[in-house]
Image (spheres, grey):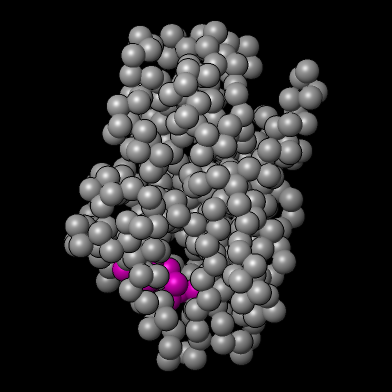
Amino acid sequence: MKRFFRFLLIATVFATTLVGCGSSGSPSEEALSSSSGETSGVGNTVLNVAIQPSAAFVPLYVVKENGWLEDALEELGVTVNWTEFESGPPMNESFAAGQQDIGVIGDVPSITALAAGYDNTIVGIGAYGVEAYTLLVPSDSGIDSISGLKGKTIGLTVGSTAHNLVDKILEANDLDINEDVEIVNLSSGDLQTTLETEQVDAIATWEPNTTRITDNGTAVILADGTGVLRGVNVIFGRTDYLAENPEVVKIFLEQYARGNKELRENTKETTEAITEYFSISAEQLQKVIEKYHYTVTVTDEDIEELQSTSDFLVKIEAIEKGVNVSDYIDTSYCDDADLAKYAVDEE
């Protein structure tokens, strides 16, 4: 059974949602056909951007909705092609095929791609949010402490950041994820229903799922990432594209910071304009974004967290060998002067 679980776990890491975003999916045929063969090298006029409807990347949706990236790149003669993905694995596949140039992705799929030998480089941090990843229990469960989970079933997406969260929370409370609880592998779309029908005793998830579930009274938050998980999501790209198009990359990062500034200074109007992307109300989205720090720049804490993610993936045998994350980070594209124009105080 343990060997079977390891096989299921490894397969799931590459086939299901791996980070704070929706259930697994793939780009539409139209999106792939529009980006295929249009990878941006020297002299190419198209920037292919991979995006996903996770609350961790709200600023990029602000940029997309306002057409700011298109405007900023117009003088360089570069147009923008957007492809939306539901999860990390199909996005990684599209990058490997040379169909995407730059994008946003969670910690787990970013590390699995590097461990698989994909030639990607991390150039910024889309967001981190310790409160954005949560462990939920039914409102009437009577479970009011982590110790109360001993012998219980926990639903989560195996190999996801939520899986990482549960492992760290249990370890911090002297419980073992393999011995003291039963893990049930679920897609993010099945978590709420499974909890409501009492097929599991708890679930682990991320925003905006947490707000959607708790707001209807189904569940309460037993714990979040505070003290154990930073919840890092990254901005990354194909290494060769980045090296050949540094000005485009700098503009991308600058516009991401601009999206965050607009989000913070005109929260109500901005969330109302983009709420359709996230399947929650504008009011809920306003609550959700308060759980994230859309920082853009990479810190030592971010690198440490990503290295911890690599260690976690080795621990659960999702990757055979860990990666030295620092080898895959290039902060030279973050121009402090340009980013300073859109600085906001998120503390």
- As drawn, 80 above or below 5: below
| Residue nearer the viewer, 46 or 194 | 194
- Magenta span: chief secondary structure: helix
The location of residue 312, given as percent across then percent down, is: 61, 33
Residue placed farthest to the front in the image?
197
Numbered circles on residues, count: 0
Q: Position of residue 208 (x, y in %)?
A: 38, 43
Q: Residue placed at 39% from the left, 82% from the top?
A: 72
Residue at x 70%, y 32% (from the top left corner): 9
Q: In this view, does 32 lie to the left or right of 308?
A: right
Residue placed most toward the observer, 71 or 17:
17
Question: x%, y% of residue 199?
Answer: 53, 19
Q: Give the position of the N terminus as an image quadrant.
A: top right
Residue 239 is at least partly visible in this image: no
Inspect the magenta stretch and tell me whether residue 205 lies in it.
no
- Residue range in magenta is 249-258
Residue drawn at point x = 52 percent, y = 38 percent: 188
Q: Residue at x 40, y 70 (%)?
A: 64
Q: Quadrant of residue 143?
A: top left
